[in-house]
C-alpha cells in the first residue's frame, strides 16, 4: 500500500506547481492574444482573400494559403515560446522568486517542465484550431497529412520551447531575456520563409534554412500540406534541437 501511494506523493509538488503557474498564466492574456487569437485571425483573413487558395507554379503547385498556413503556425509557436516563457522566468528572477525557490526542495527541471507544459498546451491548441480552419476553408478539407502536421508541430514546439528555456536559464533579467529572444526571432522566421518562401529561395539558402529549427519545421509542414509525411531529416533536426536545448537548459539553469 505504501509503495502504491509513493508516486502520488512525489508528483504532488509538480501538480501543485502546474496548477499555480497555469492560474498565473491566464491572468496575463497578452500571450493568448499574440500566440492564439492573432495567428488564427491572420490565417482566416488570408484564406478568404481571392486568389490565395489557387495553386501556383512558383510554390511547387501549392497555394499561398497552403504555404502560409505552416508559416503562420510557426509565428505563433515562436512568439509563445521565445517571447512569453523567457519573460515569465526572467521576471521571477528579477523579483527574487527564483532565489526563494532555491532553498526549497524544488528542482530546476520541475519549474522548466511546468512552463514548457503550459506553453506547449497553448501551441497545440493553436495548431488544432488552424487545422480546423484550414479544413473548413480549403476545398475538399485539409489537403495533406494531418499526422505529419501534428508530429512536426509537436517537435517544433519542443525545439522552440527548449530554446526559450535555455535563454531563461542564462539571462540575468527579463529585459535581457527579451532582447535575446527578439534578436533570434527575426532570423528564425526568415529561415522559416516568412518574407521569402523556401520554394523561391536560392538553393544554397534553402539548404541552410533546412538545418535551422524553424526552417526544418517549415519544410516538414510544407510536405505535410502537400500530402506527404515530413522528410526524416527535418524531423531528426527538430528532435536534435529539442534534446540539446532542453538538456542544456536543465544543466545551466541558475536560481539567481
Image: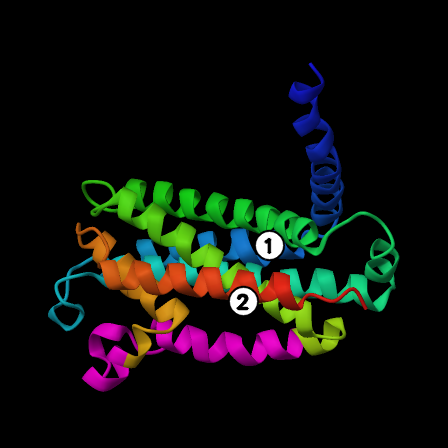
Q: Is residue 67 visible?
A: no
Q: Quadrant of residue 91?
A: bottom right
Q: Is residue 249 left or right of residue 128?
A: right
Which quadrant, please, contains the C terminus? bottom right
The residue at the point 52 percent across, 77 percent down is 184
Q: Is residue 242 magenta?
A: no
Q: Is residue 93 left or right of residue 141?
A: right
The magenta segment is 178-207
**Distance Cα–Cα, label 2 vs label 1:** 22 Å
The residue at the point 42 percent across, 61 percent down is 74
The residue at the point 62 percent across, 56 percent down is 31
How many residues crowd around disc 1 within 10 Å: few (fewer than 14), some, or many (20 or more)? few
Classify mark 2: helix, strand or loop.
Answer: helix
Residue 33, which numbered label?
1
Q: Quadrant of residue 170?
A: bottom right
Please give the count of numbered marks on the rendered protein. 2
Q: Is residue 198 magenta?
A: yes
Residue 224, which numbered label?
none
Label 2 belongs to which residue? 163
Mark 2 or 1, nearer chain start: 1
Q: Position of residue 143 (x, y in %)?
A: 20, 47
Which one is in front, 121 or 193? Answer: 121
- Give the prevailing secondary structure in the magenta stretch: helix
Which quadrant, please, contains the N terminus? top right
Which one is in front, 4 or 156? Answer: 4
Please say if 63 is above or below 188: above
Please say if 198 is above or below 40: below
Amino acid at each position: 500500500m505504501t509503495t502504491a501511494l509513493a508516486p502520488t506523493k512525489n508528483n504532488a509538488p509538480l501538480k501543485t506547481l502546474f496548477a499555480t503557474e497555469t492560474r498565473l498564466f491566464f491572468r496575463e492574456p497578452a500571450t493568448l492574444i499574440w500566440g492564439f487569437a492573432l495567428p488564427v485571425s491572420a490565417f482566416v483573413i488570408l484564406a478568404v482573400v481571392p486568389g490565395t487558395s489557387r495553386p501556383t507554379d512558383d510554390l511547387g503547385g501549392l497555394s499561398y494559403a497552403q504555404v502560409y498556413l505552416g508559416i503562420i503556425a510557426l509565428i505563433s509557436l515562436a512568439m509563445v515560446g521565445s517571447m512569453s516563457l523567457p519573460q515569465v522566468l526572467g521576471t521571477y528572477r528579477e523579483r527574487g522568486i527564483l532565489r526563494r525557490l532555491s532553498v526549497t526542495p524544488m528542482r530546476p527541471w520541475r519549474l522548466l517542465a511546468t512552463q514548457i507544459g503550459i506553453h506547449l498546451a497553448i501551441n497545440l491548441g493553436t495548431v488544432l484550431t488552424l487545422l480546423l480552419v484550414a479544413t473548413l476553408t480549403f476545398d475538399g478539407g485539409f489537403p495533406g497529412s494531418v499526422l505529419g502536421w501534428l508530429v512536426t508541430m509537436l517537435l517544433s514546439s519542443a525545439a522552440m520551447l527548449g530554446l526559450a528555456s535555455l535563454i531563461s536559464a542564462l539571462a540575468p533579467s527579463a529585459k535581457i531575456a527579451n532582447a535575446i529572444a527578439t534578436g533570434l526571432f527575426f532570423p528564425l522566421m526568415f529561415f522559416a520563409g516568412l518574407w521569402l518562401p523556401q520554394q523561391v529561395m536560392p538553393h544554397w539558402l534553402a539548404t541552410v534554412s533546412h538545418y535551422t529549427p524553424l526552417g526544418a519545421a517549415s519544410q516538414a509542414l510544407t510536405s505535410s500540406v502537400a500530402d506527404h509525411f515530413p522528410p526524416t531529416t527535418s524531423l531528426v533536426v527538430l528532435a536534435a534541437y529539442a534534446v540539446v536545448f532542453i538538456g542544456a537548459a536543465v544543466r545551466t539553469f541558475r536560481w539567481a
